[in-house]
Amino acid sequence: MDAGRPGRRSGRRSVLREASFLLAGRGEVFAVGAGGVAWKPMGSWTADDGIRPIADGSYELKWGPKDGTLLVHGSNGNPVWPAQHGVSCG
């Protein structure tokens, strides 16, 4: 999933990947470099009960002057850990 469009700024992009199996969910955020390739994850999370917060739209991606912040939301019954991730494109 390319989440760079809603939070895109100055040509920066991020790619978010998530998966779930039975009662476990997980995800990763990648920064896309100038060449258009995302080499390694900038952060990862786990989610309870197999929820997929990115697919559900339960996240915020904000870009600052030099880097970005991804906040992945869970709920009291289905937490996401860790919820906050830094994204640096350079």
Image (tube, rainbow, N blue to C red):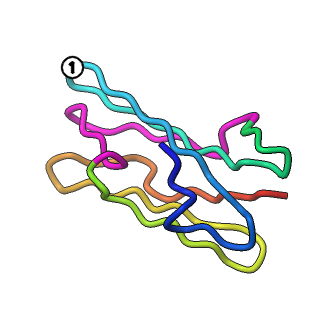
Left or right of 35 on screen, residue 37: left
Report x, y in % for residue 75: 21, 56
Residue 35 vs 59, above or below: the answer is above
Residue drawn at x 57%, y 58% as measured from the top left: 4
Residue 39 vs 81, above or below: the answer is above
Report x, y in % for residue 23: 21, 25
Q: Which quarter of the figure is the C terminus placed in? A: bottom right
Specify whether residue 49 is painted magenta: yes
Span colored in magenta: 39-55
Residue drawn at x 21%, y 19% as measured from the top left: 22
Left or right of 75 on screen, residue 8: right
Residue drawn at x 43%, y 66% as measured from the top left: 60
Residue 38 vs 2, above or below: the answer is above
Specify whether residue 23 is painted magenta: no
Residue drawn at x 46%, y 41% as measured from the top left: 45
Q: Secondary structure at mark 1?
A: loop
Q: Which residue is mark 1?
A: 22
Could you tell me the amino acid type at mark 1?
A: Leu
